[in-house]
Image: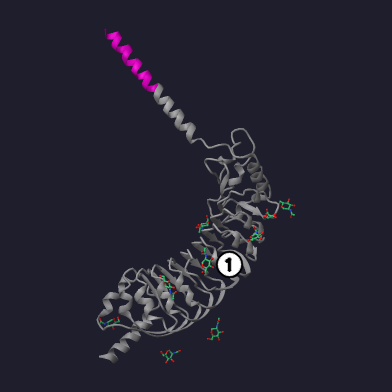
Amino acid sequence: MVDNYLYQFIFIHFLFLLSLFFVLLTVSLSSQQPLCLEDEKSALLQFKDGFIIDCSASFDPSAYPKVASWALKEGSNDCCSWDGVECNEDKGHVIGLDLSSSCLCGSINSTSGLFRLLHLQRLNFADNDFYGSQIPFGVGNLSRLTYLNLSDSFFSGQMPKSLANLSSLATLDLQYSLLHGEVPAEIFFLPNLQFLSVAYNENLIGHLPEFHSNSSLKVLTLRDTRFYGKLPASIGKLISLYFLDFRKCLFSGSIPPSLSNLTQLTDLDLSENNLTGHIPSSLLTSMTQLIYLDLSFNKLVGVLEFDMFLKMKSLSALILSSNNLTLLTKANSNDTLPQFHTLGPLRKFIWTFTEVSRFLT
Ligand SMILES: *[C@@H]1O[C@H](CO)[C@@H](O)[C@H](O)[C@H]1NC(C)=O
Ligand SMILES: *[C@@H]1O[C@H](CO)[C@@H](O)[C@H](O)[C@H]1NC(C)=O
Ligand SMILES: *[C@@H]1O[C@H](CO)[C@@H](O)[C@H](O)[C@H]1NC(C)=O
Ligand SMILES: *[C@@H]1O[C@H](CO)[C@@H](O)[C@H](O)[C@H]1NC(C)=O
Ligand SMILES: *[C@@H]1O[C@H](CO)[C@@H](O)[C@H](O)[C@H]1NC(C)=O
Ligand SMILES: *[C@@H]1O[C@H](CO)[C@@H](O)[C@H](O)[C@H]1NC(C)=O
Ligand SMILES: *[C@@H]1O[C@H](CO)[C@@H](O)[C@H](O)[C@H]1NC(C)=O
Ligand SMILES: *[C@@H]1O[C@H](CO)[C@@H](O)[C@H](O)[C@H]1NC(C)=O
Ligand SMILES: *[C@@H]1O[C@H](CO)[C@@H](O)[C@H](O)[C@H]1NC(C)=O
């Protein structure tokens, strides 16, 4: 009797374990990625062969040579499992290469295996050393790219016009390079571009085009470049922008009132340019989301009422120094000042206000 129960008990447990085994087996089979395709594998290996590994090429202290694991040996035959390589799950095509901070030294020419990876969507070469070589023209053939990050990698020369062929591109990060020459205006019109940075390329020249209201730009950073000319009124059409950084460029003329159309802006930095005229009052009343506002080191003139800034409830940094601005405030508003984390050298303005308010009363 007791034995019978015992056998039943063991049998039921056996069934249970058996079904568990099959469940696990199906799960593991269905999540297994297909092996990578032979031609893409050889393209990756050929790409790798164009480089030498030297970890002084990357600034990031946690950099390591991701391509070191790329080899044809037992257990690592599936290139989809190689470090920095991403494949799509159904077809096994290589769709992503993240070789940021990978100690790569070398350059890419038109014979590189890279240009056989035609399914690439995401490419990150940030923080390596491309020896001051050009961004290869053939990058325009990788037409499925949505993300291209070549920042901080010692790319030099002109930006290739073929970048304008990348109509799926949403992110283009070329900051901290050695680029020079003129930025092709077509870049601004890439229909899906949301993030554009060519910042910290101090020899890169450019001017802003006439923008269209169908732009998707959310982040635009031209900081520390030689972009020049006026800020076009059409900048007010970039209504998706929330981050605009033109610090240390060569822009001149006045701030267009249409800028106040950009009501989503949280960060606006136009400091260290050559901007003249008044700050449009509509700017301060409509940009209610602003967290950071820096207009310092220009040639702006006029009288501003401090109360206007108090209406910008999110504002935590306000830097207006080194212009010719006078800030007006009510005599008793001293205690409202500390809500700002950064006032810049605003003392001068507070002093100015004291003079003016005394004059007013
Ligand atoms: C392209 O680069 C590879 C690897 O660096 C090199 O072997 C080859 O000679 C180069 N080809 C040309 C045309 O420069
Ligand atoms: C580009 O890559 C670098 C290094 O990985 C990273 O810090 C940076 O945020 C990336 N840029 C964008 C826009 O993702
Ligand atoms: C890019 O595509 C063009 C036209 O299909 C082709 O002639 C050229 O060789 C390609 N460039 C590279 C680098 O693959
Ligand atoms: C870019 O597109 C133009 C036509 O739209 C084509 O002639 C050219 O070959 C393309 N360049 C690359 C590098 O894909
Ligand atoms: C955006 O608008 C401009 C001007 O109306 C037009 O030339 C361009 O083709 C449009 N772009 C897209 C992606 O619709
Ligand atoms: C302001 O934004 C609207 C869309 O909200 C756009 O139609 C209009 O052209 C913009 N005005 C200016 C002056 O850019
Ligand atoms: C700034 O503008 C003035 C004229 O308003 C011009 O003389 C000067 O060269 C400009 N400076 C720069 C750095 O563009
Ligand atoms: C500052 O602007 C006022 C007018 O708002 C003008 O009278 C004055 O000369 C300007 N000072 C300098 C140093 O430009
Ligand atoms: C505001 O602060 C200044 C300098 O600290 C001081 O001289 C002035 O009396 C203060 N005003 C009020 C109304 O507290």
Indicate whether residue 8 is drawn in magenta.
Answer: yes
| Label 1 neighbour load within 10 Å: few <14, some 14-19, many 20+ | few
In which quadrant of the rendered image does the N terminus lie?
A: top left
Relative to 278, 44 lies left or right? right
Q: Is residue 190 visible?
A: yes
* The furthest residue to the top: 1
Magenta part of the chain: 1-17
Residue 244 % position (x, y): 46, 69
Main structural element of the magenta stretch: helix, strand or loop? helix
Residue 257 % position (x, y): 42, 79
Residue 291 % position (x, y): 37, 68
Q: Is residue 102 above or below residue 13?
A: below
Q: Is residue 11 above or below residue 265?
A: above
Is the image coloured rainbow, by chain, by secondary structure, or in one colour? one colour
In this view of the protein, which residue sits in the foreground, 226 or 91? 91
In which quadrant of the rendered image does the C terminus lie?
A: bottom left
Residue at 34% x, 84% y: name it.
351
Indicate whether residue 68 is drawn in magenta.
Answer: no
Residue at 64% x, 50% y: name it.
114
Q: Is residue 41 above or below residue 20?
A: below
Residue 250 % position (x, y): 54, 77
Relative to 312, 132 lies left or right? right
Q: Amino acid at mark 1?
A: Glu
Q: Is residue 100 visible?
A: no
**What SS does tag 1 mark?**
helix
Q: Is residue 315 above or below residue 94?
A: below
Residue at 60% x, 68% y: name it.
184
| Disc 1 residue: CB within 8 Å of ligand 4 | no
Which residue is label 1 attached to? 186
